């Protein structure tokens, strides 16, 4: 589980987040969860999460070494991320994990929130509200953004014919 914090486009509702986390933790009691915060995660949220997650190891952002999150993502079958962190969402999708999104309040709509909506609409990730209905996360192949970017570049340079599907 990856927890962000409030930003210019997202607020923070600790009570709601903790309730969502408890439901996920209760649904998978045999999973040894790793929970990591970010620099934006309020200290009180970190303390609350440490109390509700007996079968989880909770890490503050400053307690993890460089590259730790990427290593954990490579091993994870599923990852839950707060909606406020688009980078953590894409890192989780790129690692090939099933991705669930914890709901946090939106303060504004912009290209980032629209991208999140598209990922949910296309089944690349599962919103918490949808997971509550089925307790299943979408299964997708990992993103391969490096390959996509390289193909685009080669097409732009005329070095590779455009592929149409």
Image (spheres, rainbow, N blue to C red):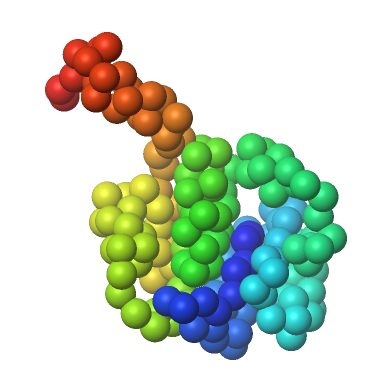
Q: Residue at x 35, y 66 (%)?
A: 113
The quadrant holding residue 73 is top right
Q: Is residue 118 visible?
A: yes
Residue 106 appears left or right of 7: left
Residue in the picture at 81% in, 55% down:
64
Looking at this rendering, what residue extends furthest in the left direction? 164
Using residue 34 as the reference point, say whether residue 126 is left or right of it.
Answer: left
Q: Is residue 30 visible?
A: no
Q: Is residue 153 shown above or below 111?
A: above
Query: Does residue 123 sit above or below 149 in this rendering?
Result: below
Q: Position of residue 72 (x, y in %)?
A: 70, 44
Identity of the residue drawn at 73% across and 43% down: 67
Quarter containing the C terminus: top left
Q: In this figure, what is the number of numbered marks?
A: 0
Location of residue 127 in the rendering, given as x and y in whole percent from the top left corner:
40, 64
Residue 110 image point, x, y percent: 31, 69
Snapshot quadrant of residue 18: bottom right
In the image: residue 21, left or right of residue 106: right
Eyeballing the image, is 154 above or below 85? Answer: above
Check the picture and name the quadrant holding the N terminus.
bottom right
Nearest to the observer: residue 52 or residue 121: 121
Percent from the top left, x then y, of residue 129?
39, 71
Considering depth in this image, is 39 or 125 the residue closer to the camera? 39
x 81%, y 63%: residue: 62
């Amino acid at each position: 589980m990856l927890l962000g914090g409030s930003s210019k486009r997202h607020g923070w509702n600790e009570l709601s987040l903790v309730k969502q986390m408890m439901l996920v933790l209760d649904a998978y009691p045999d999973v040894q969860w790793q929970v990591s915060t970010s620099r934006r995660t309020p200290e009180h949220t970190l303390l609350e999460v440490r109390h509700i997650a007996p079968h989880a190891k909770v890490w503050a952002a400053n307690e993890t070494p460089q590259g730790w999150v990427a290593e954990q993502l490579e091993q994870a079958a599923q990852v839950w991320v707060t909606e406020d962190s688009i980078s953590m969402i894409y890192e989780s999708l790129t690692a090939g994990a099933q991705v669930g999104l914890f709901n946090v309040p939106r303060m504004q709509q912009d290209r980032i929130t629209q991208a999140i909506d598209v990922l949910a609409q296309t089944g690349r990730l599962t919103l918490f509200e949808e997971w509550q209905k089925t307790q299943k996360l979408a299964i997708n192949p990992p993103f391969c953004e490096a390959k996509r970017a390289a193909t685009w570049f080669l097409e732009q340079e005329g070095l590779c014919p455009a592929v149409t599907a």
